[in-house]
Image (spheres, rainbow, N blue to C red):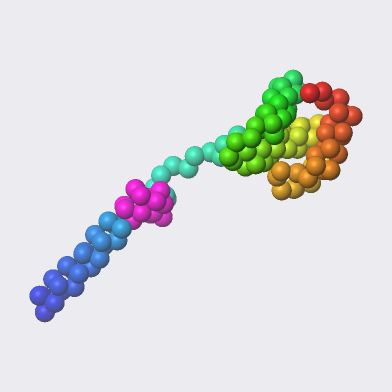
């Protein structure tokens, strides 16, 4: 009877060690923190809300991105379309962020915006007093 208890406890200990080893591997290679470790670690406060850029910085960023879009449209290199789309997406994100900063309605949309929608947002920002 004593040997049976010994074997059962040895198997339970082996399963526990295997579980700890698998959790440690998942933590190291996948970045997935085990539940029992997560409960022991202190919680970090959520990151602060993103503050609105000052109007001058928003205008400078829009100017820089508009120049980048035009530069990418002129360049004839492999991958120019992808780079142009990336620049347009960044430009459109700044347009929508500027609209949100000024209190204009910003519907959720996929980036990059269509040319018609981009022109509408630019016109709204220009009428609200933003210059770039």
Instruction: Tell which of 17 and 102 is nearer to you.
Output: 102
Tell me, yes or no, whether the highlighted magenta stretch contains residue 122. Answer: no
| Occupied quadrant, residue 71 | top right
Q: In this view, does 66 lie to the left or right of 46?
A: right
How far across and how far down the image is residue 113, in percent? 75, 44
Residue at the spot x=86%, y=25% of the render? Answer: 129
Q: Residue furthest right?
A: 127
Q: Which quadrant would the N terminus be assigned to in this image?
A: bottom left
Decide: is 23 above or below 130: below
How far across and how far down the image is residue 52, in percent? 70, 29
Residue at the spot x=18%, y=73% of the render? Answer: 8
Q: Residue furthest bottom?
A: 1
Residue at the spot x=65%, y=32% of the render? Answer: 75
Tell me, yes or no, whether the highlighted magenta stretch contains residue 28. Answer: yes
Q: Which quadrant would the C terminus be assigned to in this image?
A: top right
Q: Can residue 84 be seen in this view?
A: yes
Task: State the predominant SS element of the stretch in magenta.
Answer: helix
Q: Can residue 65 be seen in this view?
A: no
Please give the range of residues in magenta.
Answer: 23-37
Residue at the spot x=73%, y=37% of the render? Answer: 92
Q: Which residue lies furthest to the top in this view?
A: 56
How far across and how far down the image is residue 15, in percent? 25, 65
């Amino acid at each position: 009877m004593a040997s049976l208890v010994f074997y059962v406890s040895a198997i339970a200990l082996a399963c526990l060690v295997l579980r700890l080893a698998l959790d440690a591997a998942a933590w190291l290679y996948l970045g997935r923190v085990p539940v029992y470790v997560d409960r022991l670690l202190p919680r970090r406060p959520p990151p602060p809300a993103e503050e609105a850029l000052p109007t001058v910085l928003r205008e400078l960023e829009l100017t820089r991105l508009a120049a980048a879009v035009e530069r990418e449209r002129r360049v004839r290199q492999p991958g120019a379309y992808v780079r142009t789309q990336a620049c347009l997406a960044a430009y459109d994100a700044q347009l929508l962020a500027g609209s949100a900063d000024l209190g204009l309605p910003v519907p959720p949309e996929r980036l990059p915006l269509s040319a018609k929608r981009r022109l509408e947002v630019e016109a709204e920002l220009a009428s609200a007093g933003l210059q770039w």
